[in-house]
Amino acid sequence: MKSGDGSGEEDVCGLLMRTGLCIAYFRVWGYNPASDQCECFIYGGCGGNANRFKEKMEYKRAVLKIYTYRNMNFSLIK
């Protein structure tokens, strides 16, 4: 799902954390909408979606980029 703000970035906060279909064991990070937190989960190695990051800081950078662009656009509209 695209963020809808014109940034071209995928809105990872709108996606559920998906473990994927395979049986590998990769510790990754993603946004959990139920807890409203970035959390570690196990990714199986295939499938899944864009709500999956190797490191917590990688997740934070992606979300900051999306929301900074949104706020910039909102300020221009006012």
Image: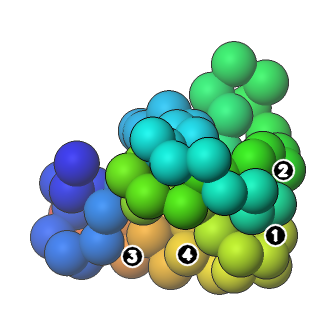
| Residue 69: assigned label | 3
Q: How far from the left and from the top, in percent, is residue 29?
A: 74, 58
Q: Residue 71 occupies which quadrant of the picture?
A: bottom left
Q: Earlier in the sequence, mark 3 or mark 2?
A: 2
Q: Earlier in the sequence, mark 1 or mark 2?
A: 2
Mark 1 or 3: the one toward you: 1
Circle 3 SS class: helix
Mark 2 or 4: the one toward you: 2
Q: State how far apart marks 1 and 2 are (Cα).
A: 8 Å
* Discs 1, 2 touching: Cβ within 8 Å: yes
Circle 1 SS class: helix
Q: Earlier in the sequence, mark 3 or mark 4?
A: 4
Q: Which amino acid type is marked by label 2?
A: Cys
Q: Earlier in the sequence, mark 4 or mark 1?
A: 1
Q: Which amino acid type is marked by label 4?
A: Ala
Q: Residue furthest front?
A: 23
| Residue 56: assigned label | 1
